[in-house]
Amino acid sequence: MITTAKSIRKALALALLFITSVSCENYLQWEYPSLGTLLSTPVVTNPTATSVQMTSTVELNSNLNIGQTGIAYHTQRNPTWDNFAAYGDGTSEISVTLDNLTPNTQYYARSFAFINGQVYYSSERSFKTDAVSYVKTGANQCASLNGITSSFRAPNGTTAPWGIGSNGYEGDYWAAPDPSGSASSNTGVSWVSLERALSKPGIVRFWIQTHNPGYNNRAPEIFVDGSSIGFAQQIAGELSSWYWMQVETPLIDAGTHTIRFEFNSGSTYVDVGVDELEFLEIP
């Protein structure tokens, strides 16, 4: 009986030693690439309202191969290289410029490097872009639809262009549906579009009302040259759809663009109004 107990204890000890050695060996093999890789936290220089410069370094074990490098950034924590990134030249010194950022906005950034085919990240750096005082470069009082394209869909499924209403935020306004037409409300996607040239990056501020009593105004999605750049954000006025609300678009690049304000009311009957456009650019 004593011999059996000793044999069992010896067998257990040998098994434990074997398990420990295998676990440690696997751990070292799994960790080895990161033991030879060091990415410095990005350093921010020359911040502006819409851009920053960022630098970082990569230190490698001589047995490892470096591939793509760069800076990943986003307005949410832990950005990844496959979302928003500015790419380096694949060397141990990363130096990039992040452009087209939104003014007065918090961002997070991490340097990254592909080492032997696997991506590694540095610790995270946060930064905030500068606020900006825009310069007004033009306006549209929305008293005419000349040069404007638009569409709304009536509840019966027919489509028609917007019209001009008389009780906007200030006087006349772009109205969907057409106040002089037969439809009194619209459903689904309703949009209005215009051409605008910006000499510098800028925004459009305007007033909206998506009149659906008991509900809030619905800010439009903004499309530039056919691609969505996000939704307009409230900056003034009332959230309730009983009243007018002022919104502004995300930052739009310099150039001549087709800018489209798109309201999606789904299956809800909603009257849409747009008034008093202001075009503003970064000085």
Image (spheres, rainbow, N blue to C red):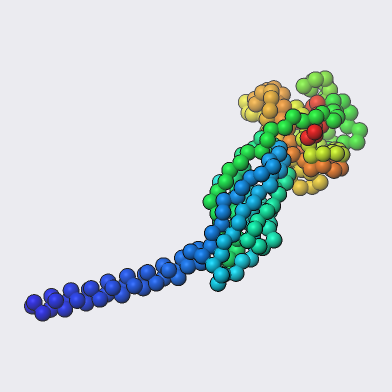
**Which quarter of the figure has residue 256?**
top right
User: Viewed as shown, does residue 116 lie left or right of 190?
Assistant: left
Q: Nearer the viewer, residue 86 or 271?
A: 86
Q: Quadrant of the N terminus?
A: bottom left
Residue 221 in view: no
User: Viewed as shown, does residue 70 lie left or right of 200?
Assistant: left
Q: Residue at x 53, y 51 (%)?
A: 123
Give the residue at the far left of this rendering. Answer: 1
User: Viewed as shown, does residue 21 lie left or right of 224?
Assistant: left
**Which quarter of the figure has residue 129?**
top right
Q: Residue at x 66, y 62 (%)?
A: 91
**Which quarter of the figure has residue 118?**
bottom right
User: Viewed as shown, does residue 257 lie left or right of 71?
Assistant: right
28 above or below 187?
A: below
Q: Nearer the viewer, residue 264 or 65?
A: 65
196 above or below 22?
A: above
Q: Residue at x 74, y 29 (%)?
A: 133
Q: Residue at x 69, y 42 (%)?
A: 46
Q: Quadrant of the C terminus?
A: top right
